[in-house]
Image (tube, rainbow, N blue to C red):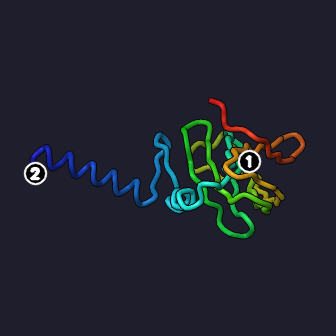
Amino acid sequence: MNRSHFGIGILIGMGFGITSGVSWDYLESADYSAIKFKQKNPQAATIWIVTKAPIWVSIKKVDGLKAKKFKFGTFPKRQGTYILPGSHVLTIEFANFDPDVSKNPKPIRRTFSEMNVNLEPRQDYLLQYDVNSGQYSLVEGIPQD
């Protein structure tokens, strides 16, 4: 195998990894169902979540159905969810990890909560979690930096 075939093999392999849903932390990635959902529903609102270790917050379900999530950026951990405008019930997961465990961390505490939201078309929101009160809030805006 000459070098050009080897390089093509690497690119094909990387392309297969990305298209098969494998994501690396240094690449922006998306769940293809989320991309298709946004293409079919350009009026969808976006809820952005930015968390810092050892905290993890994630929207698991919207009205009982799997959320249309995507990841963006590298550190801190960031994700977004596309949702049609209107009133919805979000199922949100909160996890707190042991900061001393860097390899295969397991959550120390994991809870699920529900939150009622009313979303406007094409609007961006930030889902925030207050560690002291244990409360979620949804505010208009996009992640900064």
Element under disc 2: loop
* Other-residue count near label 2 (Cα within 10 Å), few / some / many at <14 / 14–19 / ≥20: few
Quick one: 105 or 50, which is closer to the camera? 50
- Residue 121 coordinates in the image, percent (x, y): 70, 52
Q: Residue furthest right?
A: 133
Q: Which numbered disc, 1 or 2, marks the residue that appears first in the sequence?
A: 2
Identify the mark at residue 17; answer none if there is no mark. none
> Which residue is depicted at the point 46% across and 42% down?
27
Above or below, comparing residue 92 to residue 77 in the picture: below
- Residue 73 coordinates in the image, percent (x, y): 55, 39
Q: From the viewer's perspective, is 93 left or right of 8?
A: right
For residue 43, what is the image quadrant? bottom right
Query: Which amino acid lies under the numbered mark 2 shown in the image of this protein?
Result: Met
Identify the mark at residue 1; answer none if there is no mark. 2
- Residue 145 coordinates in the image, percent (x, y): 62, 29
Query: Which amino acid lies under the numbered mark 1 shown in the image of this protein?
Result: Asn
* Other-residue count near label 1 (Cα within 10 Å), few / some / many at <14 / 14–19 / ≥20: some
How many callouts does the rendering have? 2
Quick one: 58 or 53, which is closer to the camera? 58
Above or below, comparing residue 21 to residue 131 in the picture: below
Element under disc 1: strand
> Which residue is depicted at the point 79% across and 57% down?
111
For residue 37, what is the image quadrant? bottom right
Quick one: 98 or 28, which is closer to the camera? 28
Q: Residue furthest top?
A: 145
Q: Residue furthest left?
A: 2
> Which residue is depicted at the point 76% across and 53% down?
119
Q: CA distance from mark 1 to mark 2?
A: 49 Å
The answer to whether mark 1 and mark 2 are in CB contact below 8 A is no
- Residue 5 coordinates in the image, percent (x, y): 15, 49
Identify the mark at residue 96; answer none if there is no mark. 1
For residue 34, what is the image quadrant? bottom right
